[in-house]
Amino acid sequence: MSFKVLEITPVKLDDDKSELILLDQTLLPGETKYLHLTTIESIWEAIYKLRVRGAPAIGITGAYGAYLAVKHSRADNFDDFYAKFKKAKEYLGSSRPTAVNLFWALDRMEDCLLANKDKSISDIKRALLDEANLIRQEDEDVCRSIGEHGLTLLKPGMGLLTHCNAGTIATAKYGTALAPIYLGQERGYNFKVFADETRPLLQGARLTTWELMQAGVDVTLICDNMASIVMKNGWIDAVLVGCDRVAANGDAANKIGTSGVAILAKEYDIPFYVHAPLSTIDMKTKTGKDIHIELRPGEEIYKAWYEKPMAPEGVKTYNPAFDVTDAKYITAIITEKGIVYPPYEEGLVKLFE
Ligand code: MRU
């Protein structure tokens, strides 16, 4: 795919492998600025503040963060080196709780470290760097594959609704839910995409429209409470979303508001597709009830994106960052290994065989 927006690398290391270069997504669409981060505290802050966001991108950032945290360690024995790594892993894992990709990537880094435990400290460091790079590269391949599988469910000219941003900047490249849209655009499908603004942090308005417009995709921005009318108008043939964690029974946590869209889609008989790399599927979590939903500061609802607060100071708020869409509303889960249909308990297990 050759769209300019896909040339952006939202998360990478510099040539010296000592700085993490992150696209600051909080400044988009107004400003394209890259942060150069070296400390684990600044990487934690970037994840917490959503400067980098989207489940796969958070995972990649966590992996590079874990590497950078021990890169300059002067430990001369494995136990001291491992202790420093464990501390960094725990700290990075405390930045955001819902996207399982963060924990998946940090676990992969730890497994890599343990698999190399008999080597010299400098060889272990090199192995950790290679592993983080591999996690990034694999995600790119995985997203492309999700795009190919997802596109088989769509037809030229379809109207599509998406919620939040599951695009190229939320991953290593291509995105998950937006990958079939990019592939379709390249192949002349002429989709008509509706992007929910995605309150309160406006990932749909700020990021999804920004991405799709650059690729020349026909995209229309709507407020979250307009999803029903565009469905009723007959303008939506499928809903495409990403996700942060899929439980073993197919329940899927994604950006707050997703579950309402899924319930509406069922009412209007519109297929609802969740796009999830295997790194987002958490077979250890039995159902959606077991998913830890991140609660964020209420100020994000009434202050973050407004010149003046648009609610009285001190107002009581409730600001969950995600909700869980029950499996019964999900038509299919699209992964890099293929499309999984209900019953998800069986289909998801097969993916890992
Ligand atoms: O809070 P965010 O912006 O990190 O939430 C992101 C989402 O909910 C995405 O849909 C999900 O992480 C998939 S990104 C490919």
Image: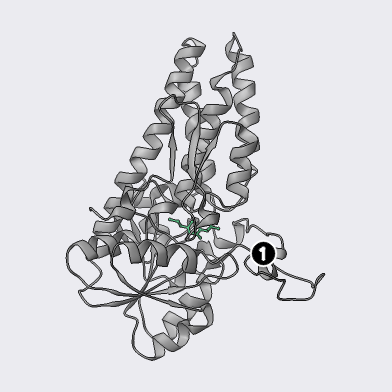
Judging by the rendered image, the residue that carries numbered circle 1 is 300
Q: Quadrant of residue 141?
A: top left
- Classify mark 1: helix, strand or loop: helix
- For the point 79% across and 72% down, which residue is it? 316
Q: Which residue is situated farthest in the right direction here? A: 314
For residue 314, side relative to residue 287 (left or right): right
Please, is residue 296 above or below residue 126 in the view? below
Question: As rendered, which of 39 and 123 lies closer to the eye?
Answer: 39
Tag count in the figure?
Answer: 1
Residue in front for this viewpoint, 82 or 307: 307
Q: Residue furthest left?
A: 187
Q: Measuring from the top left, give residue 9's x and y in whole percent.
A: 38, 44
Question: Which residue is pictured at 67% across the width and 66% down the height?
Answer: 319
Q: Which residue ends up furthest to the bottom in the rendered image?
A: 233
Question: Is residue 44 toward the left or the right of residue 175 in the image?
Answer: right
Residue 337 visible from this viewpoint: no
Locate residue 328, reporting x and y percent. 45, 72
Query: The C terminus is located in which quarter?
Result: top left
Residue 339 x %, y %? 30, 60
Give the side of residue 183 with respect to residue 236, left or right: left
Give me the residue at 41% from left, 67% from top: 209
Looking at the picture, does residue 117 appear above or below residue 162? above
Answer few, some or many: residues within 10 Å of disc 1's Cα (few below 14, many 20 plus, some between 14 and 19): some
The type of residue carrying mark 1 is Glu
Place of residue 18 in the rendered image (x, y in percent of width and height, measured from the top left): 50, 26
Q: Is residue 158 left or right of residue 323?
A: left
Residue in the foreground of this view, choosing between 279 and 287: 279
Asked if one can make out residue 7 in the rendered structure from this viewpoint, the answer is: yes
